[in-house]
Amino acid sequence: MTRRLEQDLLRSGFPVVRVHTKFMAAARRSGRQPGKSDPIDALAVAQAALREPNLPTAALDGPSRQVKLLSDHRHDLIIERTKVINRLRWHLHELDPALTIPPRGLRSYRTMDAVAARLDGLGGTVARIAGELLDRCRELTGQVNQLERELRDLARVLAPSLLEVPGCGVLSAAAILGETAGAARFRSKNAYARFTGTAPIPVWSGNNVKVRLNRGGNRTINHALHMIAVTQTRGFGPGKQYHNSLIARGKTHKEALRLLRRRLSDVVFRALLTDERRRNQATPTTPAAAA
């Protein structure tokens, strides 16, 4: 519902900024009228928009939304395929307890063909259900592979600089591109790091400076950054040297990965901005309406 309102305002020519709900709490507490209603909420949003500088701006649906829709659809199909594979494995074990299938074997057409040949000589309800599940698994695999090809083509056009980051594959780039929805809406790399959940949270007083892990932020991008960091620590980029230097200074492996993720957030942010400038997608600078 909020997205529909946002899109209607943008199409009508009104620039829009996004106001986080936490910014509205103070306005509600200090308001003259207690309670919650549409007019009270509208006043709280307007006051927060005027008070808070550098709020992220909204834009009409563009290529990044297409990437997000395709990426989310692929993720849903993979979840469905996993459920089908689990049921299929159970029926195959009932039919032939000695049958051994590799952990990820049912993602490959060769393994599916071998299982289909094994089921051809079997009868009964269990074999029939297993055959139907195998057909569904084959269909889902084809759809997943097709979506991956579409995402690869889109990522090469929309995010060539992002794909040049060592360890960033097509699926990670698609997840980052779709979830970010425009890097230019963030006022700085630090704001983007808070969005990705890689900026640590300070938990100290006095002279002993301490921080703790940020479990907030966008977990999809955080996971993609984690996979890039893990890939780089295995020798596929500059992250390995940085990781080793942190270990030499007494950091644990997990702490070093967290610090590497924070550095990669800045690298990804710069790459996204470079790609957006290349596509000439500048953010509006006119006074904005709040939503």
Image (cartoon, grey):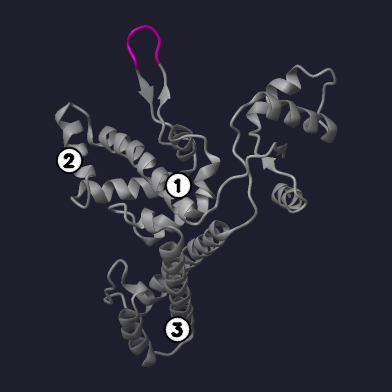
Q: Nearer the viewer, residue 10 or 66?
A: 10
Residue hosting label 1: 273
Which circle's residue, 3 or 2, is located before the other in the chain?
Answer: 3
Closer mark to the observer between disc 1 and disc 3 = 1
Residue hosting label 2: 241
Which circle's residue, 1 or 3, is located before the other in the chain?
Answer: 3
Closer mark to the observer between disc 2 and disc 1 = 1
Q: Nearer the viewer, residue 247 or 245?
A: 245
Separation of marks 2 and 1 at Cα, in angstroms:
26 Å
> Is label 3 in a helix, a strand or a loop?
helix
Looking at this rendering, what residue extends furthest in the top direction?
A: 206
**Amino acid found under the numbered disc labelled 2:** Gln
**Amino acid found under the numbered disc labelled 1:** Leu
- Quarter of the picture containing the C terminus is top right
Q: In this image, 243 relative to 206: left or right?
A: left
Q: Quadrant of residue 63?
A: bottom right
Where is residue 179? Give x, y as percent: 51, 50
Which of the labelled discs sits on residue 131, or is there none? 3
> Is label 1 in a helix, a strand or a loop?
helix
Which of the labelled discs sits on residue 243, or is there none? none
Residue range corresponding to the magenta coloring: 204-209
Separation of marks 1 and 3 at Cα, in angstroms:
49 Å
* Residue at (45, 83) in percent of width and height: 131
Where is residue 272? Give x, y as percent: 44, 49
Vertical position of residue 198 compared to residue 110: above or below:
above
Separation of marks 3 and 2 at Cα, in angstroms:
50 Å
Q: Quadrant of residue 253?
A: top left
Q: Main secondary structure of the magenta part?
A: loop
